[in-house]
Each structure stands twice: as C-alpha cells, then as structure tokens.
Amino acid sequence: MTLGDQLSDRVEQVPPSGIRKFFELAEEVDDVISLGVGEPDFSAPWAARTAAIDSLERGKTSYTSNRGMRELREAISERVTRYGQEYDPEDEIIVTTGASEAVDLAFRAFVNPGDVVAIPQPSYISYTPGAIFAGGEPLPVPTRAEDEFKLTPEALEAAGADEADVLVLCYPNNPTGAVMTDDELADVASFVRDHDLVVLSDEIYSDLRYEDDHASIATHPGMRERTIVFNGFSKAYAMTGLRLGYAMGPPGAIDAMNKVHQYAMLSAPTTAQYAALEALRSCDDSVEEMRREYDRRRRFVLARFEEMGLDCFEAKGAFYVFPEAPDGDDEAFAEGLLEEQNVALVPGSVFGEGGAGHLRVSYATGMRELREAMDRIEAYVSD
C-alpha cells in the first residue's frame, strides 16, 4: 500500500485546478503575455512595506493573538464602517492568513456533512472544493450574461436553493467583474431569510468598484446575524504574497471559526499584520491611484473587445472582464490563442457551468502589455 492508496474520498472527489492546468501549458510557451492571473501588477504601497521591514528590525517575529493584533482589528472595524458594516474588534473580527483561509474556516465551521451549499456560477474556483472538503454538497446556481451575471431570487429558486443550508456570494465577482446594487442584494436577502440560509459573503474586491459604492448583504435587516463577511489586503492593497485577510460576523460565529484557526494556523503572519495596519492607516491614496488605473484599463479592454465584435457585458468591479468566446468554445479558443499568438487567458468553464463559452481576461497588467495582448487577440479573431 502507498500513500496514494490512502487518499480521502473528499480529496479524490476534487479535480485539479482548471486554472493551474491551463497555466502549466502557458509556462511551456515563450514570449507569452498572461492576462489570466488574478494578481495586481503593482507592488504593495511603500508605507506598508516599510512597516513590515520596521517590524522585523524591531524583532516583532512572535505569534500574535489567535484573532490577530488588537490594533489591527480596531483599524478594520473602523474601516468597514464606510460600507455600513459595524463589527466589534473584541469578538466579531478575526484576522486570517489571506481571505482564502477565512473562507475555509467558515466552510469548516458552518457546513455539516451532507449540507447543501449553494454557489452562484461562474465564481471563484475555491468555493466548490472548499464546500466538498468540509463534507458539504455543492449546488451550482447558474447566473446569466443577460442578467449581467447577477444573482437573482429566480435563479436561486430554479436551482433548488430553497433547500440549501448555506449560500456563497462573491460581489464584485471573480471572474466576471459583475457587481450587485443594494436593491438587488435586498431581493437576495429576502430569499435568504425566507429559506433560513447562512450566507458567506466574499467581498475581497469591495474597494475595486468603478461606478458606485460597494454594497454588502450583511447590512440588510435580519442579515447581520446570519452572514460572515470576508475581506483582505491582497487585491486593493496589492499585498497578495503577504497573505492577510479577515472575517467578520456575530461573536458566536467568529468564536467557532477561531476554534478551527487556533488549531490549524495559530495566528496570521505577524509581519503582514504590521503591513496591513499601516496600509489601513495611511495608504488610501495608493489604493485610489491603483483603482483609477484599473478603471482606465477596464475601459480600454472593453472598447477593444467591442471593436473586435466580441460580446462582453460591462464589468463594473474587480479587475476582470468576461467576453464571449467566438463559436462558444472557450477552451478551444484559449488553447488556440495561446498556441498561435502566445496570449494566455482562462477558459470560463473552469469557473463553473455558468462560465462556459466565456473567457476570463484580467487587466491587472501594464498598459503596454495589455495593448500588445489585445492586438494579438484581434489578430487571432480576424484570422
């Protein structure tokens, strides 16, 4: 017997990442331009980096509280009031090793074996495996391009989510760039209350909206007590490698997540916590500068796809657009584009059945590369 014979059923049930599979192909191609990575091309603001360096020079290399540094939780509590969210730093916030850990903690804390987890699709690729690892049964809830990939009560009803136990939300959305307004979230909140669901709301792109302010389902009546909100520093602050996120929710819920966290992770990286604290205190201008630049790129990419005749709804958040693939075969288009023009995109089908026939295009890369990549895509489409 080998270790390969001893894999758990849950691990065997989950296929390898579709994104990773595609990028292994891209790594074999010379002169490739990648528009597939969901990572800012900016570095973290200098003030945040300086705070990290300073913490190391002062020897701040020990564990922090399991829940994270008190002053960081206080800064987070103050920051999220801009979205109408109010959480007590004492017992309603936990700092985690990236928002991804926060999502994983929530799945393990709130999903029992056999529980149904409704997941709008297309959506970030980790939600479905996370639900399976926790013993849950993922329930895809397809969203449609004609609805601008927004979640509706009708879509939830059609998918059978009235029988679900947990609903995952991700707006602004990865991979589509879709956002939802406060009124649209109110409709979803009504469905959630009527059918007694728990909501896990990933709001990691909340600072990257381009036409209006971020809205959170947790601020609607009766939702705060049944919602866990995730956020972090990877996207808006370009701190992906520092791995710092957080979750917010009622005290009992955060206690449950902390129970898992303190056994699995002990505490989030101390150096990263100092960087995050400084980011919240003094880096708003840097965030706004990056947001404006993403917006400039977003409008450029949308205009180029329109010129090519590729249908693409107007993404209004995150740093992705989600055009339709010519002939509807997203995998064939992505593979052909990589092979003939050395441009890497991600087939939409890896994000779930609602993504089939589309392509995820990240504009978190410099304008010079972006222009060259769009020229190559146009050449491939015209060929």
Image: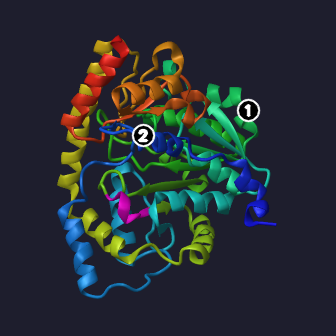
Residue 136 visible at all: no
Specify the label residue 26 is tagged with: 2
Q: Nearer the viewer, mark 2 or mark 1?
A: 2
- For residue 77, above or below residue 161: below
Is disc 1 surrounded by few (<14), some (14 to 19) or many (20+) residues within 10 Å?
some
- Seen at 46% across and 66% down, the residue is 97
- Seen at 30% across and 17% down, the residue is 379
- In the picture, measured across the screen, residue 322 lies left or right of residue 121, that is left
Quarter holding residue 345: top left
Name the quadrant of the N terminus. Answer: bottom right
- In the picture, measured across the screen, residue 104 lies left or right of residue 314, that is right
- Amino acid type for the residue under numbered disc 1: Gly
Q: Nearer the viewer, residue 3 or 308?
A: 3
CA gap, disc 2 and disc 1: 38 Å
Residue 21, percent across and down? 53, 43
User: Which span of residues is magenta-colored?
Assistant: 239-245
Disc 1: which residue: 160
